[in-house]
Amino acid sequence: MSTKQEEFTNLSLDLVFGVSVEDLLQEYLKEKELEFSCECGGRTSSYRSSFSTLPQVLIMQLKRFRFSPSLELEKADEPVTLLRDLVLTSAQGGSCYSLISTISHIGGTERGHYICDGVHPDDSPDDPRDRWLSFNDSVVFRTSGSAVCRHQKQDAYILFYKRQV
């Protein structure tokens, strides 16, 4: 067994149809088999990712762009259930995280537009008023975290979760 420690500022998660952000994160962290061949006759190996420490802000990129079997770039618009809260564990214990912002990509591979939604700067992520702002070029309008989670299932591209204190 060998161990390799790396410092990440974000995670890139493969999309799977009909799942939640938590499911994608669990898939990322589960043990995976690797093809392997060595002089000793071994043919398989595996690896598993885990957190040794937890970041203050966890940034997750949903892999919305991929190559088709014919090597054409395509947008993956599989819906992903966005969760307001996540619980993560590390070697040092667990922490709760709250969704504080999303970046969404509207459009396809040839043309598109990015918008950002985030917790109102005067609120905390767990404020019962659930005030968020949506930034779409020069237009800023009020929204809510629950509305963002409902409406951005197919377009959310980058998610920002902040550790609760």
Image (spheres, helix red, strand yellow):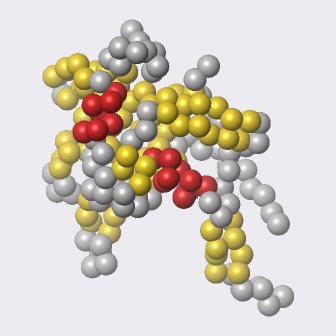
Q: Locate residue 89, reporting x and y percent.
A: 67, 41
At x 29% / y 73%, what residue is drawn? 68
Q: How many marks?
A: 0
Q: Position of residue 116 (x, y in %)?
A: 29, 31
Which quadrant would residue 41 be assigned to in this image?
bottom right
- Relative placement, left or right, of 102 versus 112 is right
98 above or below 110? above
Could you say which is closer to the camera, residue 56 or residue 154?
154
Provide residue 45's location: percent of width, then percent of height.
71, 75
Quadrant location of the N terminus? bottom right
**Extreme-front residue of the structure:** 128
Query: Looking at this rendering, what residue extends furthest in the top direction?
Result: 122
Q: Is 58 rendered above or below residue 77?
A: above
Task: Give the side of residue 141 with respect to residue 145, left or right.
Answer: left
Which image quadrant is residue 146 in?
top left
For the point 77% across and 36% down, the residue is 92
**Considering the image in quadrants, where does the C terminus appear?**
top right
Which one is nearer the viewer's eye here, 3 or 91? 91
- 45 or 24, which lies in front? 24
Q: Is residue 120 visible?
A: no
Q: Is residue 144 depicted above or below 106 in this figure?
A: above
Residue 47 visible in the displayed image:
yes
Q: Is residue 129 left or right of residue 87?
A: left
Identity of the residue drawn at 46% across and 19% down: 126
In the displayed structure, 45 sits above or below 122; it is below
Q: Which residue is located at x 21 percent, y 57 percent? A: 109
x, y percent for residue 61: 43, 47
